[in-house]
Amino acid sequence: MTYCVGMMLEKGIVMMSDTRTNSGVDNISVFRKMFQWSDTDRIIAVMTAGNLATTQAVVSKLEERNKAPEDREPSILKCTTMFQVANLVGELLRATIEERQMSVDGQAGGPRFSASLIVAGQIAGMEPRLFLIYPEGNFIEASADTPFFQIGETKYGRPIIIRGYDRTMSFEDGVKLLMVSMDSTLAANLSVGMPLDVLVLERDRFDPLHERRIMASDPYFQEISSSWSDALRTAFHSLPDYSFNDRDESVG
Amino acid sequence: MTYCVGMMLEKGIVMMSDTRTNSGVDNISVFRKMFQWSDTDRIIAVMTAGNLATTQAVVSKLEERNKAPEDREPSILKCTTMFQVANLVGELLRATIEERQMSVDGQAGGPRFSASLIVAGQIAGMEPRLFLIYPEGNFIEASADTPFFQIGETKYGRPIIIRGYDRTMSFEDGVKLLMVSMDSTLAANLSVGMPLDVLVLERDRFDPLHERRIMASDPYFQEISSSWSDALRTAFHSLPDYSFNDRDESVG
C-alpha cells in the first residue's frame, strides 16, 4: 500500500510519504511517491497512492517526458491558479486510469488501476493550497476544518494527527507529528515502509524550505519511534483509573 | 460498522463492544453485540461484527430459540472444551451465511451476509481461551504473541493497544486501555457508536467479574475521552524536537 500525508499549517505545508510499493507481500520495492516542480513564481508538489504504473504515468505526463527534453514546457508550470493545477492533474489521472481500465474491460476480476493524489503548492500572489484528487479526476480542498489529507493506509495514523494538530505549530513540530503518525502506520501495516520523504513548503517561498529522505537507520526517527511507545504508555497511565465499584453509582 | 475487542490478560479476559448498527449512514440503531452464557462449570461470551441478521440468527440458534423455552438445552453449554465451542459457533456462522447467500445467488451486486465473531471463555479445569471466528467457520486462537482480537473497524484503535498492552496489567487498566482504543475509533468512524458494553471474565470464575453498559453520558468515559487528548498532546511534546539543520549531518 502507501501512506502519504499533506498538512496545512499557518506557516505553510508539511508533506510526508513512505516509499514502499508492493505487488503481493512477496514482491516489495522502493519507489518515490513525492514529486515537485518549481519556478520563480510557484512551487507544486504531488504525492501518489495506488497503482504504481498509473501514478508513474501521471507524473511522466506532467513532466512531458514524451517530448525531447528541450521541447518540454510542463503546463503545470503555466497554470495561473492552483485550482487549475488540481484540475490538470485530476484530468490526467482520470484519463490514465480510464485508458488502462478500458484495455482490460470484460476481464472479470481483472486488475484495477485506480490511484489517488495529494497536490500541494502555491503560486505567487495567492494562498498556499492543498488538494486531494480522486481517481475520477475531481478533488476537494483542505480548509480550516479539515486541514490535512491522507492517502493510502490512512487509519492507523489518523488519531494522533487529529489530536496533535495545531494550525499554529512550527514546521519542526509538524514534521514530528507526521513522523509519529507514520510510525504508528509502519508498526501496523507491512505494506507501508521506510525510507520516508519529507518536504516542507513555506508560505511565499518558491523553493522547498526543507527536504529530506529519512532512512530506517536515521537516529532521530529511531528515537521518535522508541520514545513514542514510552510516551504513550506514560500518557495512558496518567489517565484516571477505572474502578469496578464506585462506578456502579453513576450507572442508572 | 462495529468495533469489538477481546483481550487476554494473565488474570482473565477483558471484552468491549460498541452498539451501533447501520444500514447506510441515515439509518442507525442500537443493538447489543455482546452475549454470554454461563453454568456452574463455564462461562462463554461472544461478540459479533458484520451483517446483523446473520449475527442475530447465530445467537438465536446458539440459544435454541426455535424450541420452546423448557426444551432448550444449548449445546454450547455441553461442549467439553472451548475448542469445541469455537467449532460449534464457527459452523453455525458458516451455515447461516451460506444459507442466506445461496438464496440470493445470481443477484449481481446483491447483498453480502458476512460476519465475524470473537468467542471467549473458560470451562472448569482448563485455561481461559479467546478465538476469532471467520465467516468461513474456521478460527484462530489468541496467544502470548497475539493476545487480543479486534473485529469491525479495527484500525484506528489498534496502535494504542499494541503500545499499551501488558499481559500482567490489572483488569481495571485493561478496561481503561480498551476505552481509549474505543474512543479513538469513535472519533474517526461514525458507524461505531455509544453506548459500550464491557465484560470482564476472571480466570476460574464462572460468572462475570464485572459487566457494565457505558452510556455516552458516563462521567468516567467522558473524562477518559477528554484527558486522552491532553495526554496525547503532552506525550507528543515530550518527544525530542525535530531540527532542520543539525539533522543534515546524519544524512548521507
Image (spheres, coloured by chain):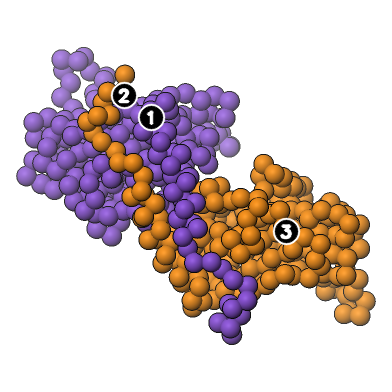
Chain colours: A purple, B orange
Instruction: Examine the rendering and report whether any part of residue A38 can be seen.
Output: yes
Could you tell me the amino acid type at mark 3? Gly
- Dot 3 falls on a residue whose secondary structure is strand
Chain for disc number 1: A
Asked where in the image residue A219 lies, by quadrant, the reply is: top left
Q: To which residue does mark 1 refer?
A: A219
Residue B191 can be seen in this image: no
Image mark for residue B12:
3
CA gap, disc 2 and disc 3: 47 Å
For the point 65% across and 52% down, the residue is B168
**Mark 1 surroundings: few (<14), some (14-19) or many (≥20) residues within 10 A:** some
- Image quarter of residue A203: top left
Label 2 near label 1: C-beta < 8 Å? yes
Q: Is residue A205 left or right of residue A3?
A: left
Label 3 resides on the chain identified as B
Q: Residues within 10 Å of mark 3 (few under 14, many from 20)?
A: many
* Residue in the image at 40% along x and 45% along y: A181
Task: Determine the secondary structure under disc 2.
Answer: helix
- x then y, percent, for residue B82: 83, 55
Q: Amino acid at mark 2?
A: Ser
For residue B208, which numbered disc appears in the image? none
Q: Chain of mark 2?
A: B
Task: Residue at 90%, 74% (x, y): give it.
Answer: B72
Q: Give percent across and percent down for residue A196.
A: 37, 31
Report crowding for label 2: few under 14, some 14 to 19, many 20 or more residues within 10 A (C-alpha): few
Label 3 to label 1: alpha-carbon separation: 39 Å
Mark 1: which amino acid? Pro
**Residue A78: where, in percent of width, then height?**
13, 33
